[in-house]
């Protein structure tokens, strides 16, 4: 029976790479759609020399601060069971919120380490939060969701490694200052074009008013029509 169950669980057609891709997509999902609404989300970027490399991590900006969400993708029972032996699972680690993502049925909620959520994935790639800060998020009110997030939040996450990860990511982008200046130039161009468009709109309104006045004056100059 155990062998048959293992075969069924492995016959899901999902790979580690496909789960990582789904994880990044889910991390960017808005709160209203049941996601954590991360501004930045990436997969498999190291957070320092050796140690933890999250399968996917996202960072959220909010009026009350920043937060991170880590997702570990598991496609086998053995991988999931071995995960708890990693040093960064014992203490520290990245992620204000943490989830395992796995094919539906591979991991039971009662098997989760304390503080970890679970995202089940169907063979069709549909994600469902079974446990964690975003469970049933679309059904919760604003304050209810905040309270649930607070209950699942890791306050002792490793911010230094998260900063390392973000710096590594920015370094891969290239010249960040050039990108920043290019963005500012695009902003200035957009502002200039917007102002020019507004001027053209005002000019068009003025021309329409002049045309309407001219047509009115011409009608007044025209001789009255004779009655038949």
Image (cartoon, rainbow, N blue to C red):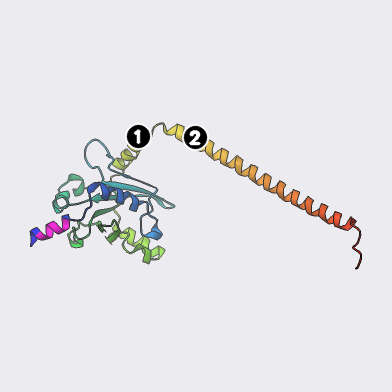
Asked if 189 appears above or below 78 in the picture, the reply is above
Q: Residue at x 21, y 53 (%)?
A: 13
Residue 142 in the image: x percent, y percent?
41, 63
Residue 69 visible to the viewer: no
Mark number, residue 172: 1
Looking at the image, the residue that sits furthest to the bottom is 228
Give the left or right position of residue 72, taking residue 192 as reference. left
Closer to us: 103 or 56: 103
Q: Quadrant of the N terminus?
A: bottom left
Magenta-colored span: 4-9
Q: Position of residue 68 (x, y in %)?
A: 33, 49
State left or right for residue 221 relative to residue 200: right
Estimate how packed mark 1 is, as few (under 14), some (14 to 19) or many (20 or more) residues with alpha carbons within 10 Å. Answer: few
Residue 112: give x, y in percent of width and height.
20, 58
To which quarter of the image does residue 87 belong? top left
Whichever of callouts 1 and 2 sits on the residue coming sooner in the sequence is 1
- Density class for disc 2 (Cα within 10 Å; few <14, some 14-19, many ≥20) is few
Q: Quadrant of the C terminus?
A: bottom right
**Does residue 157 show up magenta in the picture?**
no
Evaluate whether residue 219 shows in this view. Answer: yes
- Seen at 72% across and 46% down, the residue is 203
The answer to which image quadrant residue 226 occupies is bottom right
Residue at image mark 2: 182
Q: What SS does tag 1 mark?
A: helix
139 or 227: nearer the eye? Answer: 227
Is 174 placed above or below 119 here? Answer: above
Is residue 7 magenta-colored?
A: yes
- Circle count: 2
Above or below — where is 133 with respect to 188? below
């Amino acid at each position: 029976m155990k062998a048959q169950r293992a075969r069924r669980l492995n016959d899901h057609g999902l790979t580690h790479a496909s789960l990582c891709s789904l994880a990044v997509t889910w991390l960017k999902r808005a709160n209203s759609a049941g996601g954590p609404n991360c501004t930045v989300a990436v997969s498999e970027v190291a957070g320092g020399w050796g140690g933890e490399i999250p399968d996917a991590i996202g960072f959220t900006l909010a009026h009350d601060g920043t937060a991170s969400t880590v997702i570990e993708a598991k496609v086998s029972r053995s991988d999931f069971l071995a995960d708890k032996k990693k040093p960064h699972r014992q203490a520290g680690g990245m992620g204000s919120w943490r989830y395992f993502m796995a094919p539906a049925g591979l991991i039971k909620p009662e098997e989760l380490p304390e503080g970890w959520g679970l995202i089940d994935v169907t063979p069709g790639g549909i994600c469902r939060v079974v446990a964690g800060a975003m469970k049933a998020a679309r059904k919760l009110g604003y304050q209810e969701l905040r309270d649930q997030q607070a209950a699942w939040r890791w306050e002792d996450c490793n911010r230094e490694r998260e900063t390392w990860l973000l710096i590594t990511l920015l370094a891969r982008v290239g010249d960040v200052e050039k990108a920043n200046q290019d963005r500012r130039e695009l902003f200035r161009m957009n502002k200039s074009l917007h102002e020019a468009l507004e001027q053209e709109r005002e000019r068009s309104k003025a021309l329409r008013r002049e045309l309407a006045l001219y047509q009115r004056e011409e009608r007044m100059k025209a001789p009255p029509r004779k009655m038949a």
